[in-house]
Amino acid sequence: MADFVTGAVAHRRKFGGGKGQMIAKAVGIKGSIRPSVADVTAGLGRDSFVLATLGCEVEMVERSPVIHCLLESGLKIAQEDSETADIAERMRLEHADSIEWLARVADTQRPDVVYVDPMFPHTDKTAQVKKEMAVFRDVVGEDPDAEALLRAALDCAEYRVVVKRSRKAPEISGPVSKVLRRVSSCWVSPAGMTFTR
Ligand SMILES: C[S@@+](CC[C@H](N)C(=O)[O-])C[C@H]1O[C@@H](n2cnc3c(N)ncnc32)[C@H](O)[C@@H]1O
């Protein structure tokens, strides 16, 4: 369930550290600067919600019909809740494959930042994470086309591509080491900041 109103996401909205969060630094939130973001691996929308909470306009793209459906209903509930309505207002959702979606973006509509967080083999230890991740993985599977997605992101972003990547995850092959700069567990382009899971 994509839940933006209660639970962990709500707790992070209230107590999560605002602009000091690593994700904020990674996309380039600073002073009054709020880049527009295309989250091309929207998943359950948690990262998008953090960015929208901080004031970014976020376009979310998700290809799994099941996850898209969960995200759509979570977004609708957030739109109807007085505490989250203004945040949800900044979030738009597309059901598409992002490689194709990014190729269709008009020159005048390019997002400042493209945010990429593909699936990878997890080694998280807690039973709770294992259970949640196992269900999610059963639904979406793995993302073997992450390299093509990254290339499309690099072609489309106006200013920066941010790749969320655990330290333990294998690198996305292809353009990463040539075009992006690794700082801690995150790859960024062209000028970098970092954040961790
Ligand atoms: C690790 S999850 C993202 C989690 C998300 N950052 C969050 O905060 O909830 C990766 C998601 O990206 C989606 N995805 C991967 N490649 C995609 C593509 N080419 N187009 C659209 N969605 C994609 C998967 O279906 C999956 O739901």
Image: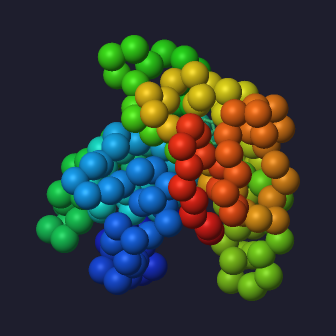
Q: Which residue appears farthest toward the front when viewing the image?
A: 191
Q: Residue furthest left?
A: 82
- Closer to the camera in the image, 70 or 145: 145
- Closest to the observer, 63 or 158: 158
Residue 45 vertical position relative to residue 13 in the rendered view, above or below? above
Q: What is the image's colouring? A: rainbow
At 76% across and 33% down in the image, what residue appears?
178
Q: Quadrant of residue 53?
A: bottom left
- Taking 195 as reference, is 32 above or below it? above
- Residue 187 lies, with reference to residue 154, above or below; the image says below
On-image quarter of the C terminus: bottom right
Is any part of residue 20 visible from this angle?
Answer: yes
Residue at 79% x, 82% y is 125
> At which x and y percent is residue 79?
23, 56
As drawn, 5 above or below 71: below
- Residue 186 image offset from top left, x and y in percent: 65, 56
Residue 184, quarter of picture: bottom right
> Can residue 99 be seen in the rendering of this structure?
no
Looking at the image, how many numbered discs can be counted on the residues?
Answer: 0
Residues 151 and 5: in front is 151
**150 or 127: nearer the viewer:** 150
For the point 67% across and 27% down, the residue is 151
Q: Is residue 13 left or right of residue 115?
A: left
Across and down, in percent, residue 32 comes to 22, 53
Residue 149 x %, y %:
66, 32
Q: Is residue 134 left or right of residue 116?
A: right
Q: Is residue 63 left or right of residue 151?
A: left
